[in-house]
Amino acid sequence: MPTHRPPISRFVVSDPAAGPYGITVGPDAAPWFTLVHAGRIGRLAADGTVASYPVDTPSSGPAIITTGPDGALWFTRSRDHHIGRITTEGVTASFPVPSAEAAPFGIAAGPDGALWFTGMNADVIGRITTDGRITEFPLPVTGGFPSMITAGPDGALWFTLNRANAIGRIDPAGAVTLHRLPTADAGPVGITRGTDGNLWFVEIAAGQIGRITPDGAVAEFALPDRDAKPHAIVADPAGGCWFTEWAGNRIGHVSADGDFHHHDLPDPASEPHGIAVGPDAAVWVALETGTVVRLAPRAGG
């Protein structure tokens, strides 16, 4: 298993108990991250200083965060069943989801100018406009645990069904198609649109990375460490995808052909979760033990 030690910068952003979890690079080119156990949203400035903004309910469990089409950051609140919004100046707002106990988790900007999210406990996909109007679409499955979601190359949204062992597709009108995975009990979680026109996802229970074409053809690539528990994945602008190995304490990279490279994290048992790529192609990872790390761009892009 090839491992490399490129320049990795480490930033302490919170108390370890606060739990940095989701991360994205905002419209201001700064990393923004959720503090799932503290009920806060953080921002890491270029000089390493950290700003931390409270959510109106400390126990809300902010999870996944993304940039919206309105230039604000949008995030899910899995423990109090809201969608949150924060401006780059730190002004927050929140919107309750219609389904009781829905536990929204994944969120992504759609091609229609709205944001789309998953309702893990309610078997729904939700759509929220930038003025806070929410529509929910039921899924044709019970107990599927929809997890992460991303915009696809075909004008639809694609999402993982962690307990239904499937990848789902929903078009802007709400029509849903499910694609079952070849490996039983694979446990898909993270998903992203690759630069190759396909969707890439992780199988946390199987220790594999998956690829699905827009017409539903699935390929799976086994990690060298099948116990690594890959969690989140993001496209690499230079090709392939980056992903976190939660149990392996590594950042991984998979090429479009399924070749792997791995980068050890500087601290043991750091629990890498969310991952994002900045405009300079640097990779940012949220570590639940209280830090954010930056992996320098690959040589040549």
Image: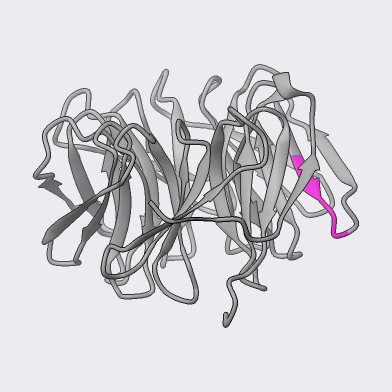
Question: Which of 282 and 116 lies nearest the eye of the viewer?
Answer: 282
Q: Is residue 172 left or right of residue 80?
A: left
286 to 115, vertically: above or below: above
The reply, left or right, for residue 232 in relation to residue 255 is right
Work out whether residue 61 or residue 251 is closer to the camera in this orientation and state it.
Answer: 251
Question: Is 210 or 131 nearer to us in this picture?
Answer: 210
Classify residue 226 by image quadrant. top left
Question: What's the magenta bit mostly, secondary-structure-wise?
Answer: strand
- Is 237 on the left-hand or right-hand side of 174? right
Q: Residue at x 64, y 35 (%)?
A: 94
For the question of whether residue 131 can be seen, the reply is yes
Tag count in the figure? 0
Q: Bounds of the magenta span?
A: 42-46
The colour scheme used here is one colour
Judged left or right of residue 299, residue 137 is left
Work out whether residue 116 can be spotted.
Answer: no
Residue 251's x, y, as percent? 51, 49
Q: Is residue 45 magenta?
A: yes
Quadrant showing the C terminus: bottom right
Rendering quarter of residue 228: top left
Q: Quadrant of residue 227?
A: top left
Q: Position of residue 111 (x, y in %)?
A: 41, 67
Residue 9 position, x and y percent, is: 75, 52
Q: Residue at x 39, y 68 (%)?
A: 240
Residue name at image x 84 percent, y 52 percent:
89
Residue at the spot x=40%, y=25% of the render? 102
Is residue 224 within the magenta segment? no
Where does the image place residue 114, in percent across and percent down from the top left?
A: 48, 58
Image: 49 above or below 171: above
